[in-house]
Image: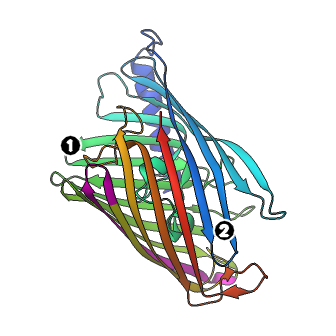
Amino acid sequence: MRLALWGILTYGLCRVAAAQDVTFQDARSLTISGFAVGTYDWDRNAGSNTFAGSKLALSLFRPWSDNLYLFGQLTASLLTDEATGEPVTEVEIDNLLVSWTPPGASALSLEFGRFDAPIGFERDDEPLNLLPTNSFNFELARPRKLTGVVARYAVSPQVSAAAYVANGWELALDNNRGKTAGVRVELFPTDGVAIGLSALYGPEVAGTDAQQRTLIATDATLQPMPRLILGVEANYGRELLGGGATAQWTGVAVTAFYRLGPSVGLTVRGETLRDRDGVLSGAAQTLRSITVSPWYFYREAQEGIFSNIEHTSFRLPAFSVRPALRIDHSNQPFFEHADGSFGMTNVRGVVELVYLF
């Protein structure tokens, strides 16, 4: 499957490039945008509460023509060093993508670089999420970033498809000789309904191509009325282990957002993730969480990269305050306390401020 997808992408790119003259004329202006995130985080088990200027993202968009553009995003994040507990600043190329639409083939785009994995409802960038924390499914059950090549094709207004070959889950540089291949089909049967079906396959263990990982995922974005957004995703994965054993996991997350008024909204998310063999979390367990977050937002963001929740009419606010209460549970002692012991539950309180520019 991986070799076939790689061959199709390479052959198609070479044929179209040979048939058309690619020029870099008609340069367009550079658009700079981004966002800043500040947080307050209280963790019951860790016994911590802290304020942080947690992230600054700078996005660049440069079209060279109607057929060719560059998108890049540089992100600086304030993190905690797991070994020392000290704060560290991590700067990374969050996205770097060159996209080309061959002349005469407006339904096709060929892309190369580092990009958001086209899977699921939840997104990596805080403004595009409806909650200030990420689910276990997002953090563990599926990849967030991929580095490789993508071919996207709009079959019709109701159907689009994508195929890609990448280094592996979250990898800027590959850790083995194999590649991860994936496909995605999106369906838009009617206004306010978007359904995605995804499949990935490839080796994800460093130094070996023998332990193949498979992920089958589906997601849906629903807006049955202007004030209501529903996001659903389900993940099933398996990975070959040494000795012929197979690890498996399944997960589901459901998010609901309701706009209560011009400047107020409420989001609720519930989820479960069964890590049957502990390959994702390090322990054979079932993780569950529920998060409740009221919103306050001010003014609509300008048209651009961060302007709306994908597949919805909800315009992102230029400034928002999102407090949240999150309760986590496991059927095993998993959540660490300040004294080094482990418990089966944890409670977090988070306040997130997001500013778009």
Residue 38 position, x and y percent, is 58, 49
* Disc 1 secondary structure class: strand
Toward which corner of the image does residue 189 lie, by quadrant? bottom left
Quick check: 148 left or right of 151? Answer: right
Residue 142 position, x and y percent, is 52, 64
* Disc 2 secondary structure class: loop
Q: How many discs mark residues in the rendered view?
A: 2
In reply to whether residue 241 is colored magenta, the answer given is no
Question: Does the rendering let one see residue 189?
Answer: yes
Say which of 248 and 193 sits in front. 193
**Residue stretch rendered in magenta on the structure:** 243-265
Q: 9 above or below 63?
A: below
Residue 301 position, x and y percent, is 37, 36
* Residue under pointer 2: 210
Q: 350 above or below 248?
A: above
| Identity of the residue drawn at 53% across and 79% down | 328
Q: Main secondary structure of the magenta part?
A: strand
Toward which corner of the image does residue 44 lie, by quadrant? bottom right
Question: Does the rendering let one see residue 175?
Answer: no
Residue type at tag 2: Ala
Sort mark 2 into few (<14), some (14-19) or many (20+) by Cα contacts within 10 Å: some
* Nearest to N terminus: mark 1 or mark 2: 1
| Identity of the residue drawn at 63% across and 81% down | 278
Quick check: 52 left or right of 24? Answer: right
